[in-house]
Image: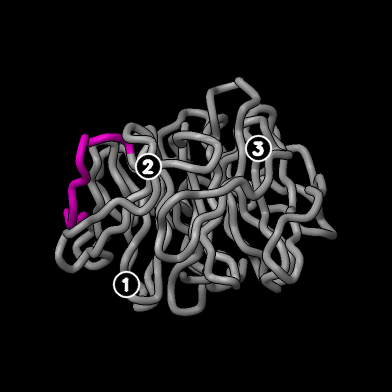
Amino acid sequence: MTRFELPQIEQFCVGLDHSEGIAATADGQIYVGGEAGQIFRLNPVSGSPELVAVLPGEGLILGLAARTDGSLLACDASAACIWSITPSSGDYQLFCDASEVGQLTLPNWGCFVPNGNFLFTDSGSWKGRDGKIMSVGPQGGIARMWSDELRDFPNGMALSEDQTFVWVLESTPGRLWKISFDSDGEALPAEFVTDIPGVPDGVAVTAGGGVVISNYRPDVVWLWTPHGGLEKLAEDPEGTVLASPTNVLFAGKDLTDLIWPNLGRWHVSVIRSSGIQGVPVHLG
């Protein structure tokens, strides 16, 4: 049983190149990446993507994060680095490609925290149990280890509504965790929240302490709340409307439109006026 049936899910934008990451800037512009280094701006009126940048190496772009000045950070799977991008000009520069413990392996997703630092998951190798969470300052540079507790392909991450902890997903096996931080922004011990069936990838925060979780496999979008537990919002056994929904974002004037890119296909999907209230993403 799902809350939303497939006919309730619309195509928000078509003609993309297997997008995974998604982010919205302060002025409401929505961006996604592509599998050949592209950064697209989504045009909700025409339903078409606008190419704003192509990063060196033309590799798969994973997580995106927006900053208050309208720039973006992009996790590049192929180059194993994070880029800083100015969408208005298409300019880019290297933000981070190494840490105090060596080169990055697979920078996947990140979020800004109140002290200005950018936390990001370095997922490691698939089922290699070598993942970690890194921290880098707002100007970029060499990252440092923030937490090495979650090693099973740490993936999606989001700052909590009250900005006192981060939600973090592990993908193999699927688990949701929370990691609080002290007054200096340092990680405290991770707290297990729940198992997630399949391979969870992205997480977005709801008002009232819940999260929406998008699954790479199977093609499912979940809602977890402290009182209701795990609920299936949408599912697509044929993988056409939902096709590897890898990350998820609340959009629209009142943050109730639920939007996600489909890594397995060429479109972004949206459930409009979902009745689920999102919270603004903390911008760097």
Residue tagged 3 = 170
Whichever of labels 1 and 2 marks the residue nearer the N terminus, that label is: 1
Residue 242 pos. (x, y %) = 46, 40
The colour scheme used to paint the residues is one colour
Front one among 188 and 102 = 102
Residue tagged 1 = 70
Picture residue at 25% right of the left edge, 44% below the top: 16
Specify whether 117 is left or right of 222.
Answer: left
User: How far apart, in angstroms, are the residues tagged by discs 1 and 2?
Assistant: 20 Å
Q: Alpha-carbon neighbours of circle 2 within 10 Å: few (<14), some, or many (≥20)?
A: many
Q: Is residue 31 visible?
A: yes
- Write the start and end of the magenta stretch as one range: 49-60
Above or below: residue 182 compared with residue 81 = below
Q: Which mark is residue 81?
A: 2
Q: Alpha-carbon neighbours of circle 1 within 10 Å: few (<14), some, or many (≥20)?
A: some
Whichever of labels 3 and 1 marks the residue nearer the N terminus, that label is: 1
Q: Amino acid at mark 1?
A: Gly
SS class of the residue under badge 2?
A: strand
